[in-house]
Amino acid sequence: MTTLTKRATVYLEPTLHRALRLKSVETSRSVSDLLNDAIRAELAEDAEDLSFFDARKNEPTVAFEAFVKELKRHGKI
């Protein structure tokens, strides 16, 4: 099965580009594979964060000022 790919131009900082090329050689993986995996990991982390936010959306909120007053009242600050 052939996977369709899209071409993109990405501008990297020179030191990041060099590190990516070195990792590519060291791991015998293409720069594209390394970038795709890094992007997938970043997007998966975002999806996980969003699911946590969604799970907690019905929790009551506390105003910052009230929270600080509560900390003072209990001698925490």
Image (cartoon, rainbow, N blue to C red):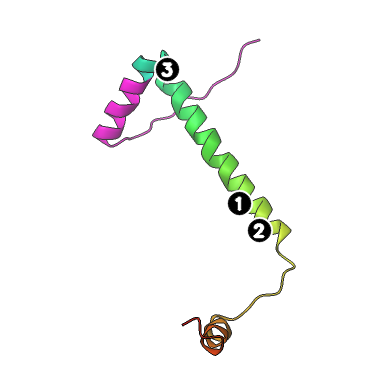
| Residue 15 falls left or right of residue 63 | left
Q: Which mark is residue 30?
A: 3
Give the Cα separation between the discs numbered 1 and 3.
29 Å
Badge 2 vs badge 3, beta-carbon distance below 8 Å = no
Q: Which mark is residue 53?
A: 2
Q: Which mark is in front, 1 or 3?
A: 1
Q: Residue visible at 38% across and 33% down?
A: 10
Name the residue at the left extreme: 14
Helix, strand or loop at disc 2? helix
Q: Residue at x 70, y 62 (%)?
A: 56
Per the image, is 32 magenta? no
| Residue positioned 27% across, 27% down in the render | 18
Numbered mark located on residue 49 in the image? 1
Task: Determine crowd level at label 3: few under 14, some 14-19, many 20+ residues with C-alpha closer than 10 A.
Answer: some
Q: Amino acid at mark 2?
A: Phe
Is residue 58 depicted above or below 15 in this figure? below
Query: Which element carries disc 1, helix, strand or loop?
Result: helix
Graded by Cα atoms within 10 Å as few (under 14), some (14 to 19) or many (20 or more), the crowding at tag 2 reads few
**Looking at the picture, which amino acid does disc 1 mark?**
Asp
Label 1 neighbourhood size at 10 Å, few (<14), some (14-19), many (20+)?
A: few
The residue sitting at the front extreme is 75
Amino acid, disc 3: Ser
